[in-house]
Image: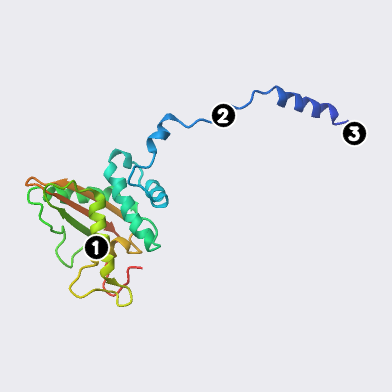
């Protein structure tokens, strides 16, 4: 059987390709420029991970700021980033509302009965206390934690830091409230909770 030459079909294809209009250059949608990193996000890795793990956080800027600073601390310990949890944030908002009247530095759980991990912070009147201030205060305890001894330095606290970097913790939700008498109360909740007796954070 005699085969037909392929020259004619090839010429036709080339003609069609040449006549086809060139594809328009791809443009970013207008809203894409609204998601530029905020000024505080100096670590691109921590910010990108936090933004990806914080869906819907555009509605409340504090959420992404809380998550970014937590993940910045975890990155220093080579721990995986936390995700933002709306359910934990809802619980944190409830507890922050309870503290609006007195700004007392109290946990929402009785000692020894923590169903969630929890860090609390109080900033005095006159300060514009932001999420970074609370997380920086908790993270500073890392200098008082001994991994070799798995303990805090004598007379010092380090449990807020170890909760932030606890390896098995995967989610966080936070809230802050301006108190009636001045000052700011900030609380963050974590799941699964850390600071399990006899275990190391990482």
> Which mark, by number, is residue 160?
1
Q: Are marks 1 and 3 in contact (CB under 8 Å)?
A: no
Q: Position of residue 134 (x, y in %)?
A: 23, 54
Q: Are marks 2 and 1 in contact (CB under 8 Å)?
A: no
From the viewer's side, name the closer residue of 152 and 189.
152
Q: Are marks 2 and 3 in contact (CB under 8 Å)?
A: no
**Image quadrant containing the N terminus:** top right
Image-based side of 80 in relation to 138, left or right: right
Question: In the figure, 154 relative to 188: above or below?
Answer: below
Circle nearer the viewer, 2 or 3? 2
CA gap, disc 1 and disc 3: 79 Å
Q: Position of residue 100 (x, y in %)?
A: 11, 48
Question: In the figure, 7 relative to 192: above or below?
Answer: above
CA gap, disc 2 and disc 3: 42 Å
Q: Position of residue 68 (x, y in %)?
A: 33, 50
- At mark 2, the secondary structure is loop
- At mark 1, the secondary structure is helix
Q: Quadrant of residue 137?
A: bottom left
Circle count: 3
Q: Quadrant of residue 106?
A: bottom left
What residue would you read off at disc 2? 25
Q: Residues within 10 Å of mark 1 (few under 14, many from 20)?
A: many
Q: Residues within 10 Å of mark 3 (few under 14, many from 20)?
A: few
CA gap, disc 2 and disc 1: 50 Å
From the viewer's side, name the closer residue of 143 and 13.
143
Marked residue nearer the N-terminal end (2 or 3):
3
> Which mark, by number, is residue 3?
3
Q: Residues within 10 Å of mark 2 (few under 14, many from 20)?
A: few
Image-based side of 113 in relation to 59, left or right: left
């Amino acid at each position: 059987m005699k085969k037909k030459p392929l020259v004619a079909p090839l010429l036709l294809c080339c003609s069609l390709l040449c006549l086809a209009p060139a594809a328009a250059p791809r443009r970013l949608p207008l809203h894409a420029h609204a998601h530029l990193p905020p000024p505080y996000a100096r670590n691109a890795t921590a910010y990108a991970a936090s933004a990806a793990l914080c869906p819907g956080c555009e509605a409340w800027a504090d959420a992404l700021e809380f998550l970014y600073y937590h993940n910045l601390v975890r990155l220093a310990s080579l721990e995986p980033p936390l995700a933002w949890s709306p359910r934990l944030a809802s619980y944190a908002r409830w507890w922050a509302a309870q503290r609006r009247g007195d700004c007392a530095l109290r946990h929402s759980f009785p000692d020894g009965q923590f169903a969630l991990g929890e860090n609390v912070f109080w900033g005095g009147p006159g300060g514009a206390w932001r999420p970074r201030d609370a997380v920086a205060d908790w993270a500073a305890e890392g200098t008082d934690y001994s991994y070799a001894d798995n303990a805090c330095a004598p007379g010092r606290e380090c449990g807020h830091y170890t909760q932030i970097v606890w390896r098995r913790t995967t989610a966080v939700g936070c809230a802050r409230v301006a108190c009636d008498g001045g000052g700011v109360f900030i609380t963050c909740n974590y799941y699964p909770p850390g600071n399990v007796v006899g275990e190391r954070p990482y």
